[in-house]
Amino acid sequence: MTRKKILGSHLKRLLSGVSDHGKNHLSEVETDLLQTELLLEEAVDKLTRSFMAIHEAVGARQDSINLLLAGGTPSADEIARMKAMSGEVGVHVNSAITSMQFQDMTSQLIDRTLKRVTGLRAFLGTLGTHSAGVNAETDSEEIVDLLGKVSMVLAIQSLELRSVLRKAVNQQHLESGDIELF
């Protein structure tokens, strides 16, 4: 192979690797951000419903208390309803607490997204650092050698980043129950 073809082959492999690496990580960032948005929307909706239900239950209890304070005698149905209210409020509070688990899930997604962005920045920084050694007078053998070294460093960085970015957040919805929280 001629020097020109070797140089072209190394350059093509390097640029293709950078492009693939960048596209893959940005695609994962997009997926994580969309999943985070979905979890946040779902959690806010569920929290709103839970707090409104708590408000309604407390309001109903207050009506019964007002009846008693006014000297009224509650009916058997009202007495049963007052006894059930504590359990009802407890159910709504538990629902609100469950929906607040989104904070942990979104925190995991955001942390992974930040690691991807940081890794991609380091990856591009490596290119910038190594490109400083190339100038107009650099001969093709030196360029081929430099491209080989850069490709190797980038491959190692990519593997290191991939090993740090395990898929720990699997839950798609708050109700699905398949999340690794801790």
Image (spheres, rainbow, N blue to C red):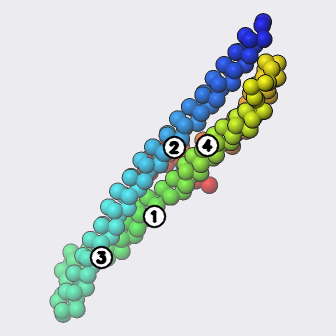
Residue 59 left/right relative to 125: left
Vertical arrangement, residue 59 with respect to residue 120, above or below: below
List the residue tagged with mark 2. 32
**Disc marking residue 116:** 4
Outermost top residue: 1
Label 1 element class: helix
Residue count near mark 1 (Cα–Cα under 10 Å), binned few <14, some 14–19, many ≥20:
few
**Disc marking residue 122:** none
Query: Residue 86: where, in percent of width, then height?
Result: 36, 74
**Disc marking residue 58:** 3
Residue 57 left/right relative to 95: left
Q: Earlier in the sequence, mark 1 or mark 4?
A: 1
Amino acid identity at mark 2:
Asp
Residue 36 left/right relative to 130: left
Q: CA distance from mark 1 to mark 4?
A: 30 Å
Q: For marks 3 and 2, give the one nearer the viewer.
A: 2
Q: CA distance from mark 2 to mark 4?
A: 10 Å
Q: CA distance from mark 1 to mark 2?
A: 23 Å
List the residue tagged with mark 1. 97
> Does the rendering let one see residue 6?
yes
Q: CA distance from mark 1 to mark 3?
A: 18 Å
Residue under the image location 48 percent in, 45 percent down:
33
Label 2 element class: helix
